[in-house]
Image: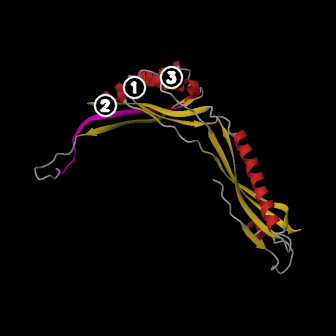
């Protein structure tokens, strides 16, 4: 999982040992180093793991009716029950947010002619479909299965998620940063020793990466409205990865 890119640039061929002008450094050219020294660039990765303490998922209701008003009214009734069930389960108002609300026509299937071709022309509208979806942040993971079960029983026929996360990721990211720098320095010492040189200083450090939780998908459809028990939900662990690019100046021993 770790990658390495090694670039050695000697400056012995430079006309003089004076530092490059600031404008040259700002333009992305090779940083100035002393004559006879070497620039080493190392890419390293650090990681840390944490048990997630929060999860996000979506819950929604899709209904149909012969008119747009009928479909929307039926949807509103069921969605009100769904949101009420979330609040009864202890989900705070700030953790419930509408993410999609739509009303769309339902078209009849195109008519087919005896020769197998379809009849040209506009398709007939036979009804309407209304959908309403809310995004939910679940802060008590032990209650996740019960909350999903309650949603389905309250009328939700679309449940997607969860996506696990950390409510406070800074500690995990800092741990990964320290590990990445240590790994970069270990490699720099290794290459310097193999080349008969030593690390003189760190020239620059740049960072990329972050934690990327792997989603565990749970989907509920209308056919699952009669769940007998709460579905099991396993949180597992999240891995936080930080990639650093560190430039070292190597000096002769």
Reply yes or no: does residue 130 show up in magenta. yes
In the image shown, does 127 or 136 lie closer to the viewer?
Answer: 136
Image coordinates for residue 234, horizontal then vertical, percent = 55, 31
Image coordinates for residue 151, horizontal then vertical, percent = 45, 24
Examine the rendered structure and indicate whether residue 118 appears above or below residue 150: below
Image coordinates for residue 240, horizontal then vertical, percent = 65, 44
Q: Residue at x 36, y 33 (%)?
A: 130
Q: Which residues are magenta?
A: 119-136
Q: Which residue is mark 3?
A: 146
Q: Residue at x 31, y 31 (%)?
A: 64
Examine the rendered structure and indicate whether residue 36 appears above or below residue 179: below
> For numbered disc 1, what is the local secondary structure?
helix
Residue 205 is left or right of residue 217, and the answer is: right
Task: Check whether the beta carbons of the residues at disc 1 and disc 2 lie within 8 A of each other.
Answer: no
> For numbered disc 2, what is the local secondary structure?
strand
Report crowding for label 3: few under 14, some 14 to 19, many 20 or more residues within 10 A (C-alpha).
some
The disc at residue 252 is none
Q: What main secondary structure does the magenta stretch of the protein show?
A: strand
In the image shown, does 57 or 95 lie closer to the viewer?
Answer: 57
Q: Residue furthest left?
A: 114
Residue 205 is left or right of residue 65, and the answer is: right
Residue 246 is left or right of residue 112, and the answer is: right
Camera-nearest label, 1 or 2: 2
Report crowding for label 2: few under 14, some 14 to 19, many 20 or more residues within 10 A (C-alpha).
many
Camera-nearest label, 3 or 2: 3
Per the model, the C-alpha gap separating discs 3 and 2 is 27 Å
Examine the rendered structure and indicate whether residue 156 appears above or below residue 102: above
Q: Which residue is mark 2?
A: 64
Per the model, the C-alpha gap separating discs 1 and 3 is 23 Å
The answer to which of marks 1 and 3 sits earlier in the sequence is: 1
Q: Quadrant of the C terminus?
A: bottom right
């Amino acid at each position: 999982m770790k990658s390495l890119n090694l670039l050695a640039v000697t400056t012995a061929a430079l006309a003089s040992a004076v530092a490059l002008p600031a404008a040259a450094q700002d333009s992305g050219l090779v940083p100035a180093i002393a004559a006879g020294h070497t620039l080493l660039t190392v890419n390293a990765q650090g990681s840390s793991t944490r048990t997630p303490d929060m999860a996000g998922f979506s819950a929604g209701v899709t209904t149909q009716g012969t008119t747009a008003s009928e479909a929307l009214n039926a949807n509103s009734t069921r969605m009100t029950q769904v949101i009420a069930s979330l609040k009864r389960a202890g989900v705070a108002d700030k953790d419930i947010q509408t993410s999609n609300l739509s009303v769309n026509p339902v078209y009849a299937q195109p008519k087919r002619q005896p020769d197998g071709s379809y009849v040209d022309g506009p398709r007939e509208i036979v009804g309407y479909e209304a959908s309403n979806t809310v995004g939910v942040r679940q802060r008590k993971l032990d209650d996740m299965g019960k909350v999903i079960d309650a949603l389905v029983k309250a009328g939700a026929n679309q449940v997607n998620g969860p996506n696990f996360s950390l409510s406070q990721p800074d500690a995990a990211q800092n741990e990964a940063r320290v590990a990445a720098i240590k790994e970069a320095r270990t490699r720099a010492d290794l290459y310097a020793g193999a080349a008969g040189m030593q690390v003189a200083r760190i020239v620059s450090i740049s960072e990329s990466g972050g934690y990327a939780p792997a989603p565990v998908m749970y989907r509920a459809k209308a056919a699952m409205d009669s769940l007998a028990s709460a579905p099991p939900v396993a949180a597992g662990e999240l891995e936080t990865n930080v990639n650093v690019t560190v430039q070292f100046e190597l000096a002769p021993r």
